[in-house]
Image (spheres, rainbow, N blue to C red):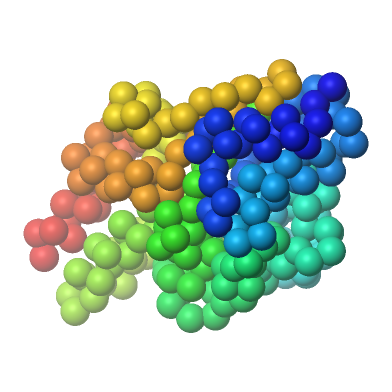
Amino acid sequence: MITWQDVKRMAEELGVREGDSLIVHSSFKSIGETENGADTVIKGLLAAVGESGTLMFPTLCQNDWEHVYENWHMDAPSDVGYLTNYFRKLPGALRSNQATHSVAAIGRDAAYFTETHGVTGRRHGIFGDTPFSADSPWEKMLEKNTKMMFLGCTMLACTMRHLAEYRYIDEYLQKAKKSPRYEELKNRLWCYDRWKEGGVWYHLGAALMEPILNERGQMHYAKCGNADVKLVAAQDFVKLAYEEMDARNADTFFMPDGCGWDPQDIFDWLNEVNAL
């Protein structure tokens, strides 16, 4: 029977400290029996970051992908687990106003993380130009070096990988901005409004990067009931992501079963931009 004190101790064992910002990707059922259901987990995590910290959960909406933007509203159910829906409805929880990759937050910096999502600093990309904009919670998590916890789930759930992808591709688009080929190059990228047409994109495999992070001593591991728990800092993850993308490393390129993505397609695109 897991108590909130057990959850707090687990988080502290991983390196979570009072005042931290922490985002949690989760599988509630993986934990096993808890004293007071989801409240046990949330209470323990909030205790770990303390009154000066901020706790966040992703509240992504992706199941009805073709209609997600037109159907979005601030009470739209999250598609990424029971805890995310429980958390977003708690008193004091704030949610960012973005259709596909919103974040809910409680704590000292909850408003800071959530209030400007997609208002300015938009970036062209695979899910549209607002999810990983320069004013998004994901960008702010990187700036604050938020700690990322994977509670009973693998790093396949790591949404921060998309921020790295967006930033990296945006830097290349900025290089091409003055080229007469800019629109052609931009339109070859995989994007929400042409989803069925496909395109090229740098699909980082966060789970494939875990062994490298672990070798560097940047991954931390613990148990919470039956659940395996992992933690890594956002800046460590994104730094490695940039290294892997700069190296054009196909070994850390994510290709789901049955998908025809070829890493070389995006590598060729990046090389074309470099040659301008």
Side (left or right) of 128 relative to 239: right
Give coordinates of residue 223: x percent, y percent.
63, 22
Among all residues in the image, which is located at the extreme right? 36
Give coordinates of residue 175: x percent, y percent.
19, 69
Q: Quadrant of the N terminus?
A: top right
Q: Is residue 114 visible?
A: no
- Along the viewing direction, whichever of 267 and 35 lies nearer the viewer: 35
Examine the rendered structure and indicate whether residue 182 appears above or below residue 246: below
- Name the residue at 42% across, 31% down: 219
- Along the viewing direction, whichever of 246 and 108 lies nearer the viewer: 108
Side (left or right) of 62 relative to 213: right
Examine the rendered structure and indicate whether residue 226 appears above or below residue 10: above
Give coordinates of residue 81: x percent, y percent.
75, 41
Among all residues in the image, which is located at the extreme top? 226
Side (left or right) of 268 relative to 42: left
Q: Is residue 174 visible?
A: yes
- Along the viewing direction, whichever of 133 and 20 lies nearer the viewer: 20
Examine the rendered structure and indicate whether residue 226 appears above or below residue 192: above
Q: Count the marks.
A: 0
- Name the residue at 57% across, 51% down: 18
- Name the residue at 63% across, 73% down: 111
Among all residues in the image, which is located at the extreme left? 275
Give coordinates of residue 220: x percent, y percent.
47, 29
- Name the residue at 22% across, 53% down: 270
- Along the viewing direction, whichever of 157 and 49 lies nearer the viewer: 49
Q: Quadrant of the C terminus?
A: bottom left
Side (left or right) of 7 relative to 264: right
Examine the rendered structure and indicate whether residue 205 appears above or below residue 177: above
